[in-house]
Image: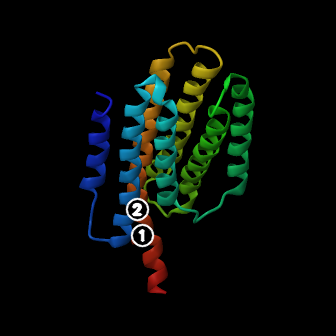
Amino acid sequence: HQVLPYFSFNGILVSSQNKNSDEYKCRKLILSGLALSCIGDAFLIQKNLFIPGMLAFALAHFMYILALGFHLVELKCGCLLYGICIVMLYILMPGLTGPLIYAVPIYGFILATMTWRSLAAMNTYKIESWWLSRITGIGGLLWMTSDAVLAYNKFVDEVPYQDALIMVSYYLGQLGITLSSLICWRKYDGLMGAKKSK
């Protein structure tokens, strides 16, 4: 049943396709991220496949980072998120053992980077729709929240209602990132088009 939301997200991407090659590349990256996330979910169902699952999600974040780009740096936002990541890792480290001592910090910084780029996207693109410009950043924050709850629950202490908190924030986060495909469309059709016309 965890796979079903991905079909809905893929539907958003397919229904919004057009012939623009730049847009296609952007949405292909997001679609790759969704596929890798689906693989990550499948791995995490098995308790002994936590690291492969984390690797799949790290690759998914990398796809989203490439799709969102670095058109606007927003350095203060990045520093804040990396600071939050460091604090969270400080809390988690006593509970980490073996390869997780290295894997979790690496994943954490990749996740923080994806969230940074999703928040920067709110100010990067000339978008007529206010909610669309915000939903990508909110999606990144929700995904970071979901993983923070999951990590705290797994390595530190049990979190009340952890399943609901993790799954709801995770899928809403995925939806927000998926809707960034519409921002990609605006970016390539708007900003890049404006540059070409000069």
Q: Quadrant of residue 108?
A: top right
- For the residue pair 82 and 92, the one nearer the viewer reads as 92
Q: Report the amino acid beneath label 1.
A: Tyr
Q: Report the amino acid beneath label 2.
A: Cys
Q: Which residue is mark 2?
A: 26
- For the residue pair 91 and 97, the one nearer the viewer reads as 97
- For the residue pair 193 and 9, the one nearer the viewer reads as 9
Give the residue at the far front of this rendering: 98
Give the x, y percent position of residue 16.
Answer: 28, 57
Foreground mark, 1 or 2? 2
Give the x, y percent position of residue 139.
Answer: 49, 42
Q: CA distance from mark 1 to mark 2?
A: 9 Å
State whether residue 177 is above or below residue 165.
below
Which tag, 1 or 2, sits closer to the chain's start?
2
Quarter placement of the N terminus: top left
What residue do we see at 65% from left, 61% from top?
A: 73
Give the x, y percent position of residue 11.
Answer: 26, 47
How would you rate the neighbour count of disc 2 (Cα within 10 Å): few for under 14, some for 14-19, many for 20 or more? many
- For the residue pair 47 and 112, the one nearer the viewer reads as 47
Q: Quadrant of residue 156?
A: top right
State whether residue 162 is above or below residue 91.
above
